[in-house]
Image (cartoon, rainbow, N blue to C red):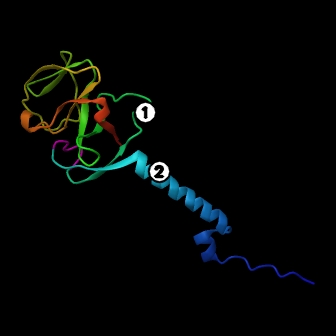
């Protein structure tokens, strides 16, 4: 008595579900779970509104915030971060220019940290900002947008506490 060997799977079946449907289902479930965890707890989409970060980030574009970026190290000067204002639905996108304990000032549109002028290659729109030296607290960061052509008082900038920094922009 001869045993009939099952027909090999068709090309379409191998492309869609592979040779082993059970293994493919398990892989799909693992990938779906990983994507849900990544999308829900690690990467947070943020829509840029306003012109304060131009030309680095254009208005109405969506970027991702890595919520785990500062898990093992504190934010650094130059990092572009999301700062929560009122829950998870209202956030600012700003660049960190001043670190805890530093003194931040603007003179003729140039940034000074502890009295030393800082190089800012990302600034395209220069300005004439004047701002007296301001001490950043021990758990604070000084943040400002890249579009410095706006009037100093029309531009949302200043000190923020570490707990308000959600994460670092990925893209």
Residue at (68% x, 67% y) in the render: 20
| Vertical side of 2 occupied by 73: above or below | above
Please tell me whether mark 2 sits on a helix, a strand or a loop. helix
Is 144 on the left or on the right of 13, as rendered?
left
Q: CA distance from mark 1 to mark 2?
A: 17 Å
Q: Quadrant of residue 2?
A: bottom right
Q: Quadrant of residue 167?
A: top left
In this picture, which residue range is highlighted in magenta?
52-58
In the picture, the quarter occupied by the N terminus is bottom right
Is 57 inside the magenta-drawn segment? yes
Tell which residue pokes out farthest to the right in this image: 1
Residue at (56% x, 60% y) in the render: 29
Please tell me whether mark 1 sits on a helix, a strand or a loop. loop
Query: Residue 43, how many percent across, how many down?
Result: 39, 47
Residue at (34% x, 39% y) in the render: 168
Is 20 on the left or on the right of 41, as rendered?
right
Is 64 on the left or on the right of 49, as rendered?
right
| Vertical side of 52 occupied by 127: above or below | above
Q: How many marks?
A: 2
Q: Main secondary structure of the magenta part?
A: loop
Is 18 inside the magenta-drawn segment? no
Mark 1 or mark 2, which has the lower sequence index?
Answer: 2
Residue under label 2, please give it.
37
Q: Looking at this view, is 8 or 34 the one in front?
A: 34
Q: Looking at this view, is 120 or 53 the one in front?
A: 53
Residue under label 1, please give it.
71
């Amino acid at each position: 008595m001869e045993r009939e060997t099952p027909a090999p799977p068709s090309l379409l079946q191998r492309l869609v579900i592979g040779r082993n449907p059970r293994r493919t289902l398990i892989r799909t479930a693992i990938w779906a779970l990983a994507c849900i965890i990544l999308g829900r707890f690690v990467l947070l989409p943020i829509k840029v509104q306003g012109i304060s970060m131009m030309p680095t980030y254009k208005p109405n574009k969506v970027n991702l915030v890595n919520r785990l970026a500062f898990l093992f190290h504190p934010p650094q000067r130059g990092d572009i971060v999301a700062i929560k204002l009122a829950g998870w639905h209202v956030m600012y996108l700003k660049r960190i220019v001043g670190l805890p304990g530093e003194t931040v000032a603007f003179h003729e549109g140039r940034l000074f940290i502890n009295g030393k002028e800082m190089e800012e290659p990302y600034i395209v729109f220069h300005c004439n900002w004047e701002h007296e030296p301001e001490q950043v607290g021990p758990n604070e960061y000084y943040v400002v947008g890249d579009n410095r052509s706006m009037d100093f008082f029309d531009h949302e900038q200043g000190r923020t506490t570490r707990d308000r920094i959600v994460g670092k922009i990925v893209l």
